[in-house]
Amino acid sequence: MLTATDPTTAGVAVGPPPTGAAVEVVSVTQVTQGRTTLHDVSFSVAPGEVVAIVGGSGAGKTTLLETMVGIRPPAAGEVRTTGARGRSDVGYVPQDDIIHRDLPLARTLRYAAQLRLPAGTAPDAVDRTVDEALASLDLAERATVRVGSLSGGQRKRASIAVEMLTRPAVFFLDEPTSGLDPATAREVLRLLRRLAGAGTTIVLTTHSPSDIDLCDRIVFLARDGHLAFVGTPAEARRHFATGDLTVAYERLALEDTPEAWAERFASVRRRGHGHDARHLRAAPTPVPDPDGPVVPSAPSVPVVALAPDRPRRAAPPAHRRAGALRQWAVLTRRSADLLVRNRLTLAVLVGSPALVIAMMAVLFRPGAFDPAATSASEATQTVFWLAFAGFFFGLTYGLLQIVGEMAILRRERLAGLHVTAYVGAKVAVLTPVLLVVAGGMLAVLRALDRLPSAGGSVYAALLVTLTLEALAALALGLLASAAVTDVAQATLALPMLCFPQVLFAGAIVPVPDMAAPGRVMSVGLANRWAFESLGRALDVDRLVAPLSPPSAHHAAFTGSPVAGWIVLAGFVGLLLAATIAVLHRRAPA
């Protein structure tokens, strides 16, 4: 095994050395929202190369990279990766530093390693791999620092470290130097060159001309994803007739149309090879030592055709990934860790129940469930708002759980994460919290005489009802969180999901008195079934006004609360299944 001290790799190797992978982009066309964003793009990347995808804004650099990674299946054409062990041998670092910021760096990497390393990896091997990754990326001294407190360059290296845990054979990076100062950007490029020297194939996007000369070859895209050039930096200077590649950006933007640039390069291909070559390959051109002065790459033959029948490297056998159950256990520990370390989340978890209980104590007078009461209306309203509180807690806890992690989830899905394990971990962590909140609310309201004196079986039924309703609301919140695109949309969804639960639960207007559409809508609302089950568990009509005529809610409160439990449990299952289906679509593996 190569380690961080191996002189041949300048301290970047972690685990077994990669064999390098070849990537072939074959006539790829991509369509986004009805607009063609890549037009018949073909090129290849040889094992151990550093290749930059460059071009101006709107050229489709990120679209091409995500298509190569597999995040976006091409509308036409294909991407072939040979010499890799499947997903476990493909690393991807998006432009944003997508790692949890509330955890210490070493702990973040340890969770990532437990999810990515082969099944059965011993704990000491996991720790050793994390330590090697930290050392190789010069982050060992920052191991205990919260990720959010790292500098921009350190976070970028930390994001790279996540992928280096498994030593991928091919590494895709989207704008790895974006937002970094020149010295830090050069440090990141220096790292990538060392990784390539250790055998990893590197494909990156960049908008910085200063990054180009540290790459073996570049792929220039004109506007709307037209392929304008493939070759070495020196060849690019000759092709665009300039010694400054910044001018090439200007020429692509101002001279001719994107189609004209693509046809010009296609004609160069045809003249160079005598036929329309679809695959391009050039052996990696020696580049300058990244620690020394940057000079243009040496001139070479313009572009060499890669014969269609080129022998392919056989892919090494894939390792067995951690199964869904192991992933669930790791994700559950990580989610719990994040929960207790995020102060805002803790404030919501503790503050929301305290505020709701305080409002209910102020709103309702003691003794509303006294048998001497002349009306069941106040008791009915107490039951209703008790039910709504359970719904509100579950919904608010679930709404922000996924949307804030969607980018991380997409990245981990590429590494083999099971969606079922991810959603199951959220439920496993929040279920005890909801159980404690429901039990605490019942205890406090009983102590304040806002709930009646009753036996343990009655309060057990109340606790089961509130917990099931909170879980149904949690599942609804997770579904909404998976479906929206940002936190602002999740926040706007809160009142939209709450209002129907208030209006159509049957407390303001009994269900039989509603218009037909309202009665139909009420069937699909968790708050209705929880309201009825709570009223049945307390037997409100008999308890409050046994000598009075039956209340308007008599029919709703007649029967066993178990019927409502069955419906609520069904909601939980259906909503969680819908959440998993949405995540499969939004974060494909």
Image (cartoon, helix red, strand yellow):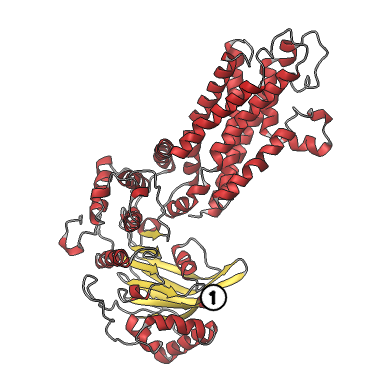
Check the image and report above or below for 80 versus 155. Answer: below
Direction from residue 457 to residue 79 in the image, left or right: left
Report x, y in % for residue 428. Answer: 48, 34
Rendering quarter of residue 10: bottom left
Check the image and report above or below for 299 versus 327. Answer: below
| Residue at image coords 58%, 46% | 490
Frontmost residue, 262 versus 143: 143
Q: Can residue 311 be seen in this view?
A: no
Q: Which amino acid does label 1 sit on?
A: Asp
| Residue at image coords 83%, 13% | 549
Report x, y in % for residue 494. Answer: 62, 41
Check the image and report above or below for 16 versus 421. Answer: below
Report x, y in % for residue 221. Answer: 46, 77
Q: Can residue 416 be seen in this view?
A: yes
Q: Is mark 1 on a helix, strand or loop?
A: helix
Residue wearing tag 1: 224
Rendering quarter of residue 86: bottom left
Q: How crowded is mark 1: few (under 14 residues within 10 Å), some or many (20 or more)?
A: some
